[in-house]
Structures are given as structure tokens and as C-alpha cells.
Image: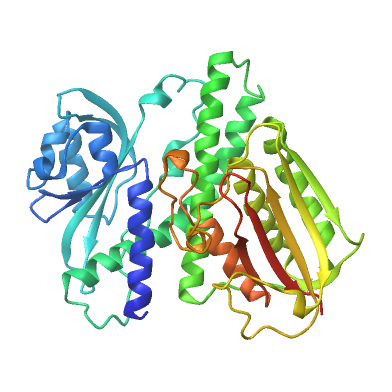
Amino acid sequence: MGKHMVQNAGIIAQTFLKLSNEMFFALDTDKKITGINPSVSRLLGYEPDKINGKDVAVIFRDQAFLAELFTTLGTKPFTPRKETELVSETDDNLPALLAGAVCTDESGKTVGYMIVAADLSDYKMFEGEVKIGYDELMALNSILTSNKNDLEESNTKLVKIDKLKNNFLSMVSHELRTPLTAIIGFVKFIENGAVGPVTPKQTELIGLVNNNLERLLKLINELLDMSKMESGTFSINRTICDLTDTISVAVNDISPIAQSRNINLIKEFGAEKVMINMDAYRISQVIINLLNNSIKFSPKGANIWIKVRLIDFKEIIPPVYVSLEGLKQCRYYKVTVEDEGIGIPEGMHEKVFEKFFQIKKDTYSKPKGVGLGLPITREIIGMHGGRIWAQPTAEGHGAEFIFIIPAE
């Protein structure tokens, strides 16, 4: 793996650490804390400048548990997750599900430890009803293992950190996605009353858990897609299929979200069947992404239009920041998603396709995602030989996203 790819993977993994609700503690070989992620400060109250350099024992209420953890790490690369209590800065107890792992260099020498802890406070309120195997979800049976690679600066601290982040990203995509999907299904199983009556309060809490799990799964999928794109391993599988049918299925999939806000999804297709060579799954991903953005930024009762029209190459008139160089000079299908939302501020239409970009403005004060959906969408359309852009409109008069895909 080249240095550039490692750095990109490191950026993605570092962003995931910042967004994660999990608490992460990096330790040196003397078991002193060398780094924490923002969740530690949020949940336990410790700031990096106050906790770094201290023995990890200060955060454990049960010192015997800590001793057992390091005894296990003396013979195994990682520990199974177990419940314990952590100590906050104000000496309060925080129930947590915790595991540890050994960090090694390429020669197998131990260079430190990583402790991962999940806050169990909310789950304790309905633990008896929603015992969903949290241990399996967060099993870290392969985190931070040493992988051989051709890194040129293998003896430097920067390369070691990048390797750690890369291993963690791989663990997220391959170890968490499958059990997370299963747990989402199990939560829905409980929500439907399959294991007994569910009270209104429990239903509300289960709904919150399910929403957070869905968001985490979406983030994991987006991180995996972006990682594959950065490494050049992302691919599409094209077959001759119906574009309008693919769009209709995507609209049906997202309709419950639109209906919950009384938003109307209006289809305007120029033809009943549009047979083209495309990856239906990935084009559906594009449509759902665009519609999801429109729904999130539109007021209740608004309209969203999805239009499909056949155009000649000479009719393609994108903004100046979109290059048509390399496109086939043939006919294209133009797909437009137009809404009545708050729109995109002037000068931001190109930036919304940048990785992790978030519009910083009072109107957008509440986070609406992590900024990966549109970059992934642009990559998918580009791999189909097309282009995508946000059509400049007056701010406050809705957003309009357009993509073109070859008809021939």
C-alpha cells in the first residue's frame, strides 16, 4: 500500500473515531494513557491535557478487573468484551462494556495497548427487554492485528499510527457490519412484540436504539465504499436494465421516510421503459442518497420531483466546475431531483461533493450526516460514464441535483 493510500485510510479511520460513541483509550507499554477520543471527554469528563500521562487505573472502579484484563493481554492479542464500571472525573460510576487489545509493530513487539469501552447507561433502562448480544456486536476479535505491508517508513511513529487506523477501518467494515445487521433485525423483532408485550416507553427507547444502529450501519457502509474507492477496488456490475423501474423501486424504499413528514415524491418520466447498461444497485443507491438529502432539508408538506429525460450531448450544460472532458458524444438520460427545501448557499454547490464537507451555517446547525454520501454518489455516476452536479439556484428556493448517464 502506498503512502498516499495509507494517509487517506488514516483520515477516514480518524474521522470514524471522532464520530464514534465508543470511548477509546490509547496506552503506552507502561499502561499510561497517551490519547483519548472525544467520547471520553463527553462521557467521563476527562480532557486530554488532564488525563494523558496518567495510569489507566484511575478510570477503573474495579482494580481486579483491570488486573485480569492485562493478565489476559499477556497471553492473547485481545480480550472479550466484559461489563465493568469506569470512574468519571467527578468520581461517578459509568457502566461500560469494555475490551482491550495489544498493539504490536511488524516484528511482533508490543508497543502499547488500546482499550475500547461502550457506555451502557441508556441500555440498562431496558436491558431485560433488549438483551441483544451487545458483546457480539462489538467483538474486537481482530482489531489492531499486525498486517504485513510495504510501507517505506515502517520504523516511524507516523507509519505505526497509520497502520493502526487502517487495521481499525478494516475491522469496522468486516467485523461490525454483519453482526450489526443481525442486531438491527433482532431489535425490530423485539419491537414487534415477538418476545412479549412492549410498553410505550420501551417502544420509544427501542426506536432510538434502532435509529442509531441504522445510522451506524449507513456510516460503516459509506466508510467501506469510500475506502474501496480510495484503494481502487470499488467496482460496478453493469447489466441491461430499466432505469425508470430502478428509480421507482428506490422511491418506494424511501417513501416511508417521506410520508412521515408528509412530503410528496413526484415522478416525471419521459418514457415507461428506459433500458440502459448500468449497475441497478448502485444507481438505486444514488437515487436514495439524493432523495434522502432532499427529504432532510425540506419542510413538512413539501414536494420533491424526480425527472427523467432523454437529451442530446449538445444539450448538456453543467456549471463551470463540471468538466465534460472524456464523455462519449452520444445521447444521455438526464435525471433530476428537485426539492422545495432551504437550498444550497452560493459558492457551496461544488464543495458539497467533497469528502466530509459540512455546510457551517445557522440554518444547518444540526448535523445531517458525515459528508460521504455525495462524494460516493459522484464516484458511482463517474464510473457509469456520466456526471453529477448541484444546479445553482437562489438560496431558500430549493436544491436541484442533476446527473447524466449514457443512453447508448
Q: Residue furthest right?
A: 272
Q: Which of 193 and 158 is in front in this view?
A: 158
Q: Which residue lies furthest to the front in this view?
A: 394
Residue 9 in the image, given as x and y percentages of width and height? 38, 67
Count numbered badges in the picture.
Answer: 0
Residue at the spot 63% in from the left edge and 18% down from the top edge? 196
Residue 374 can be seen in this image: yes
Residue 393 in the image, given as x and y percentages of width and height? 61, 55
Q: In which quarter of the image is residue 234?
A: bottom right
Residue 258 in the image, given as x and y percentages of width and height? 70, 37
Residue 71 in the image, given as x and y percentages of width and height? 18, 46
Residue at the spot 84% in from the left edge and 57% down from the top edge? 245
Residue at the spot 72% in from the left edge and 31% down from the top edge? 262
Q: Is residue 248 left or right of residue 185?
A: right
Name the image colouring. rainbow
Please tell me whether residue 18 is drawn above or below residue 105 in the rendered image.
above
Q: Is residue 68 left or right of residue 377?
A: left
Q: In this view, does 102 lie to the left or right of 378?
A: left
Residue 179 can be seen in this image: no
Please tell me whether residue 370 is drawn above or below residue 155 in the rendered image.
above
From the image, which quarter does the N terminus lie in? bottom left
Residue at the spot 63% in from the left edge and 47% down from the top edge? 398
Please tell me whether residue 403 is drawn above or below residue 356 in the rendered image.
below
Q: Nearer the viewer, residue 230 or 292?
A: 292
From the image, which quarter does the C terminus lie in? bottom right
Q: Which of 173 and 228 is in front in this view?
A: 228
